[in-house]
Image: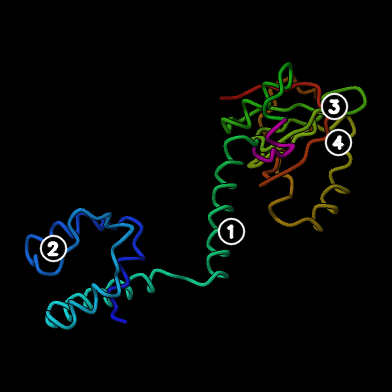
Amino acid sequence: MMCIVFLKMDSEFDIDEFTKNLAGTHPELVEGLEGTSLLDDFETDEFERKIVNEYPELAEKICELDEKTVKEEQEKKVSKKQQARDRRERLEAMMIEGRSVVEKKDETYHDRILEIKGPLELLAKAVKGELRIEVRTRAVDRIDRIFEGIPTTFDEHMNVMMKNVTETIRYGRKAKKEVGSRNRVQEFLPEFLRWKEGGNWPMPIGANSLVEHRFQRSCFVKGDSIVFVRTLS
């Protein structure tokens, strides 16, 4: 059988329109079909044989066109396994996009603490804006250290992590007598952690007190020792 069977395969093919056009160019091919229901009575096999016998050149061109169409359709076809893989990929892509619309992003503790309200809101703003703050801590009966730096995170207990910190310490009355022992301890410290004399101490210093400072790239300040916090910029 000739390859014109594509007339049956294409669900959108209009046999009435085809035969009308064919009657205009080759009336002898549709002779005797007038007044009949073409969709019900048209015999494709006999029609093909008539074209092959009487118009071989036309039949050859139709076959070439048909083969080209079939080849294009075959190239588009993929295996059922590949179709399943493609469908799964499309579904996964749709699910990812859909989840991004209806689901909240995974929040860390750091993300949540930055939305805190109340007294700790000052720290939250400093973390978001990378503002320098001043933190004062206490000894038993006095303020003995001041930290100036940029906070990176904190918690509800007011424990604070800071970076680029200048730490200033004020020793008590016996500080000058203990200079030798402190110097011996400093020999075991790396250079950047060693205390240097002097520093910015905003409060009155007693006659027997001693102020020293050092720079730290990062440090942790425990919340239960903090007595005062303010922003510097």
Foreground mark, 4 or 1? 1
**Residue 170 placed where, x, y %?**
79, 31
Q: Residue at x 57, y 41 (%)?
A: 98
Q: What residue does disc 4 label? A: 175
Q: What residue does disc 1 label? A: 88
Say few, some or many: other residues with alpha carbon within 10 Å of mark 2 (under 14 / 14 to 19 / 20 or more): some
> Is label 3 in a helix, a strand or a loop?
strand
The reply, left or right, for residue 107 in relation to residue 5 is right
Say which label, 4 or 1, has the lower sequence index.
1
Residue 56 figure quarter: bottom left
> Is label 1 in a helix, a strand or a loop?
helix
Foreground mark, 3 or 1? 1
Residue 219 position (above or below residue 158): below
Foreground mark, 2 or 3? 2
Q: Residue at x 70, y 55 (%)?
A: 191
Say which label, 1 or 2, has the lower sequence index.
2
Verify CB contact (< 8 Å) between mark 2 and mark 3: no
Foreground mark, 4 or 3? 3
Quarter of the figure with the C terminus: top right
Amino acid, disc 4: Ala
Label 3, label 1: how many angstroms apart (C-alpha)? 62 Å
Q: What residue does disc 3 label? A: 138
Residue placed furthest toward the left: 25
Label 4, label 1: how many angstroms apart (C-alpha)? 73 Å
Amino acid, disc 1: Arg
Say which label, 2 or 3, has the lower sequence index.
2
In this picture the colour scheme is: rainbow
Q: Which residue is at the front of the view, 46 or 178?
A: 46
Amino acid, disc 3: Arg
